[in-house]
Structure formats: C-alpha cells, structure tokens
Amino acid sequence: MIGDLMMDSNAPLARLVRRLERYAPLPAADRQAILALPAQVERIGRGRRLIDEGQQDHAVMQLLSGYACRYGLLSDGQRQITGVFVAGDVLGVRSGDLPIAAQTVSTLSDVELVKIPHTAIAALAESRAAIARALWNESILDANMACDWIVSLGRRDARGRVLALLQELTARCRDAGLTIRDSLILPLTQEEIGDATGLTSVHVNRTLMALQAEGLIDRVGRRVTLLANRPPAAARMLSA
Amino acid sequence: MIGDLMMDSNAPLARLVRRLERYAPLPAADRQAILALPAQVERIGRGRRLIDEGQQDHAVMQLLSGYACRYGLLSDGQRQITGVFVAGDVLGVRSGDLPIAAQTVSTLSDVELVKIPHTAIAALAESRAAIARALWNESILDANMACDWIVSLGRRDARGRVLALLQELTARCRDAGLTIRDSLILPLTQEEIGDATGLTSVHVNRTLMALQAEGLIDRVGRRVTLLANRPPAAARMLSA
DNA sequence: CCCACGCAACTACCTGTGTTAACTCGATGC
DNA sequence: GCATCGAGTTAACACAGGTAGTTGCGTGGG
C-alpha cells in the first residue's frame, strides 16, 4: 500500500535520492529502498555538535537547511575547519568497517536534517551495488575537496585563501539554490573564516576590507557578493 | 586448474588482497576473484607521472616498492603535495561514476607497481559487495588523512608541520616494514618536503637543522631518525 | 679526468601575518 | 535604561617565514 505513492518529492528522503543520483541514476528498486529507510527529521540549533571525533555510533545525516562544518583540534586548543557543509550535503558517511569518526562535525547555524541509523544504510549498501557506489562517490568527492583545500592552505596567501573559500562557498550555495547572482549570506563569522583559512580573525578582517577596497567583493552586513573571478572573458563569451 | 594453487603469497596480487583485508576479511571467492584479475607489473623511474589531473582513462595501481606523491599546481606554477604514498598503498581508486582524476600523482623514487585496468576493478566492485566496501574504505582513509593534513597546514608552524610529516612518514613506513627503530631513508628532497608542508626549501632546511640541534631528530645523509614524540610517558608504561 | 648538475647548507634582508589591545555597534536581557 | 556580550574594525609592534643570493659536496656522464 505504500509503493509508488511514497514517491512524494517533498518527503525528506527524496532529497537523499536526488543527491545520490548526482552522478549516475539508481535503479528504481534502489530508489524505493532509500525512500523506505527509517528516517527522522530533526531541528538543531547553532553551535551543536553532530558527530564527535572518536565517537562510534553515529548516524548518516543529510542537511536539509542550514550550514555545518567539520574540524580538528590541536592539543593547544587551536581549531582548524576542514570542510563546510551546505543544504543537501551528506554527513557521517562511512563504510561498515571503519567505525570511528575521524573528526568532529558541528553546526554553523540552525539546521534541519534527516537522520538515518547507520546500520540501515550499511545494509542497503551491502545488498545494492549502485547505492554503495553512490555513497563511495561521496567519500571520493570529500577527499578531492580536502585536497583542493590543502593546496590553498599550503600555497596561497591570505587573500588567495579567503577568495578561494568565498568562491567555494558561492559555488556550493549556488548548487543548493541559496544564492542570488553570486551573492550569499555568509554562514561563518570572521573568526570561523579564520579557522577555515588558517588565519586569525583580525587578519581575515584586514583581508576582507582589502578585497572590498579592490572591488573584488561587495559586502552588506553578512551578505557577500563575488564581483571578480567570474569566468574570464573568453569563457563568458561562450555562455553569453 | 588455477584455483588454490594461485594463492602463492608472492604473487603481486596477493599483496592487494592483504591490503583490502586490512579492516575486514574478504570472502574466499572474492579473494580468488582479485587474484584472477588481469594485472601487469611495471618498474618506473623517479619523477614520472602515474596519473594526470583531468585525465580520464587511468588504471588502479598498487605500489610494490618505492614512493609516490599526489599534488596540485597553482596557476603561478607553485606546487603543493597533498599526499605521500609508500609501498602497499593503492592509487587511482575511484568509483565508476567519477571518471576524472582530481590531482596528479607522480613518483618520488624508482618504483615497482601492479597495474590493473579500471574496468576490471569496477566490474568486481559492482558484483562483490565486500570488495566495493574495501575500496570505499581506501577512499575514506584518504579523506581522513587529507583532513589531518589540513589541520597541520592551517594551524601548525614550520616546526610542527615538518615534525608531523616525519611522524606520518615514519608511521607509514613502519607499517610497510621500511624502518629500523623509527629510522627511515627519506624519499623526499628538502624541496619536496617544502612542497608537502607549504614551506620553502630554505625554511625546511632551517627547521631540520633546528630539530636536530634540539635533539628531536637525528640525521645522517638522507637517513632520519625520530627521537622525540615517542608516545608520552603514560602510554609507554602501558606497552613496556 | 673534468665538467655539469642536483641537492644540502648557510647568510642577509624583507614582508606577511600574528599579537595585543583598543574602540564601535547592535542585539539581548534584566 | 543600563549592563552585557558577540561580532566587526582598526592600530602598533614583533617575528616567522619568504626571497635571493652563494658555497660546497657528491655523483654521473662524456
């Protein structure tokens, strides 16, 4: 009696299906299996931890709205953000064999998310190759984004790192439909931008002011607009 | 007629089996399937590229001996190494859906490796859940190591980054049986250490000299020994 | 044999970023 | 209506690390 009627595209799990089909379509039976997963929608406030480093029993979650970030801490208490998550992103993905979360994930804003017991996801991945592959894709993309971040941190100066972060955020928010013409409301305080770029909040401020003075970005309160680093002229001509 | 006799543990593919069983054993049939994979052993000299960023048709490889690294380039030609690979590590792992290599991989020394066509691996992962999961594990670990690297680059000073690199290399070489009492022959020039840590070769040199003067490391030519950052006293007592 | 070359080692000088310490402004709460 | 707090902003100063050179050693090639 559930069957096809459950294909309601407003259901939170429909969004997970869409996400997992980003790179390759899933068999209809796999789609149904995902929609039938036991899931729970939660609202959580800003600054709450979703996954703790070293913790064993976490669930797979998909952000429906809001922002979160993953970070590591050093023994002296310094924090480094290693990834930002926007609506649509999937957190806590792991195979069944590596039970320990490597880093902490916490919310940057109030969020809504769907939570699925890890055992249910693992069982699906075990029996359905296409779903396993889609989850695997998430891990690969995660690694790729992390590598890009390493390049930024290692070889760009403050200006370049802040710009790269703004560009990445803009691009990801655009994909999630959260921007208006390359303008978005920054989910990060300047302190948090510093934690993401390996700078101090003071220097982040200096850098943002400089970027604004140069006309590369526009800022009104928390709303930031990227004015430069549009595709270079040649590429713009192609799409115009 | 092949069957069990192929379980010769000297065969290069036996090492791949061992690697993929690091976290969970594989069914015997899966082990056999891996051993039956079409594979090709190659020797390649130092400084050769194994995978090119943006290239489509690369194979899955396992290093049998030697060292390699993955890196990204900036438009101004600066290079940032995002990962070092030692004997036993698997390169070019990806699901079937994301056909493009995100970064370049090249050798740091003369290497021996087994090369397996990607299509053969993908077919195995498609039909054998345990193998898919083992490959997925490799991607997850890759992402985890990248995140640790981000923390180092963002929040540690030169001393901390060089130490962290030496510790990681020592640990991984130890797992591969390449160390004698925390001492290993560095596969990286100081310039390459700089590319990995986001420093210049000049400053890497300063830092290494300082670490040696402080008695944290010992160096004879390219052979480096970690003297400090052994497990802290409490942990040592447990294992003693 | 000598030359070229890559790599390590070292120096002097310069600059980007961290540090510290103000001050402003709004929001929140009592 | 005042105290409090978090976020952003600015300034002065210090230092880690970059830049640009030179030296010297070892190795491999002609």
Image: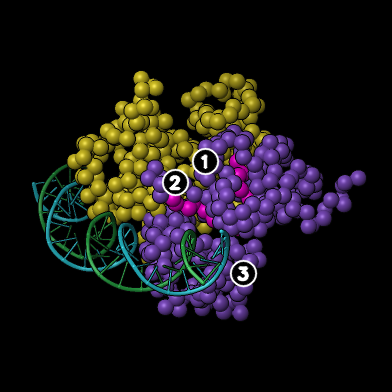
Chain colours: A purple, B yellow, C cyan, D green
Chain assignment, label 3: A
Calculate the distance from the C-alpha at mark 3 to the C-alpha at mark 1.
32 Å
Amino acid marked by disc 3: Thr
Task: Tell whether label 1 touches label 3 (CB within 8 Å).
Answer: no
- Magenta residue span: A79-94
Marks 3 and 2 belong to one chain:
yes
Tell which tag, 3 or 1, sits nearer the viewer: 1
**Residue at point 21% right, 40% down?**
B214
Q: Earlier in the sequence, mark 3 or mark 2?
A: 2
Image quarter (top left, top right, bottom left or bottom right) of the N terminus of chain B: top right
- Label 1 resides on the chain identified as A
Q: Do tags 1 and 2 sit on the same chain?
A: yes
Which of pointers 3 and 2 indicates the residue nearer the eye? Answer: 2
Residue of label 2: A73
As helix, strand or loop, the secondary structure at mark 2 comes to strand
Task: Look at 60% across and 20% down and name the residue there.
Answer: B4
Position in image of residue B207 (x %, y %): 25, 48
Per the rendering, the mark at residue A179 is 3
Q: Do the residues labelled 1 and 2 touch (CB within 8 Å)?
A: yes
- Which label was assigned to residue B73? none
| Residue A96 seen in render | yes
